[in-house]
Amino acid sequence: MTRLAGYNLLACPGCGQVHTRPSYSSISVYTPKDVISSNTKTCASCKNQFPADEFNKVGYLSRFTKEEEAERFAWTLHAIGQGPRPAIKQPQPFFLRKWLSLKTIFTPTPKKLWEEYPPLR
């Protein structure tokens, strides 16, 4: 199964526009198109094409929050016998879960960090 780890932030060599490009933690049977695509990439801002190697990496955005990353790391350590069992979060009561799910219908969802930048094509 192909798994997405996060997004690399790449700056255009011509205009400096920052783009996102998926960073995969594993690729198995299905190979994403952006991995096997051509070596030239088009900037969403200036519309010029450049070799993919010329885009400068300016950052990285994880799919997870810092708390989620710490929890995943703790569970990984526990799985290989290198740490104590992490505390398990208590589930929310049924009525609170239903209220929160109804509340999300009427409130707009905030943009994710990687949605602020256009994808690199």
Image (cartoon, rainbow, N blue to C red):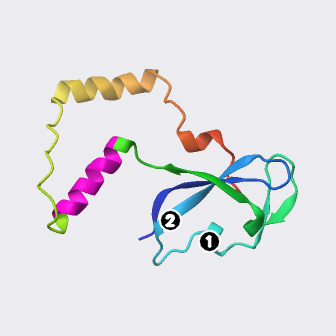
Mark 1 — residue?
35
Q: Amino acid at mark 2?
A: Tyr
Q: Quadrant of residue 50?
A: bottom right
x and y percent of residue 47 in the render? Answer: 86, 52
In this view, 12 is above or below 35 = above
Q: Residue 70: image x %, image y %?
A: 30, 48
Whether residue 60 sits left or right of residue 12 in the image: it is left
* Mark 1 in CB contact with mark 2 (< 8 angstroms): yes
- Dominant SS of magenta comes to helix
Is the N terminus in the top left, top right, bottom left or bottom right quadrant? bottom left
Q: Is residue 18 left or right of residue 93?
A: right
Residue in view at x 34 percent, y 50 percent:
69
Badge 2: how crowded within 10 Å, few (<14), some, or many (20+)?
Answer: some
Label total for image: 2
State the residue at coordinates (55%, 40%): 113
Q: Position of residue 85 (x, y in %)?
A: 12, 54
**Vertical placement of 61 versus 105: above or below?**
below
Q: Relative to 111, is 74 above or below?
A: below
Could you tell whether 114 is left or right of 81 in the image?
right
Task: Depth check: give the residue in front, 10 or 93.
Answer: 10
> Label 1 sits on what residue type?
Val
User: Which residue in the protein does label 2 denote?
Assistant: 24
Q: Residue at x 22, y 57 (%)?
A: 75
* Residue located at (48% from left, 73% from top): 27
The stretch in magenta equals 67-78
Q: Quadrant of residue 104?
A: top left
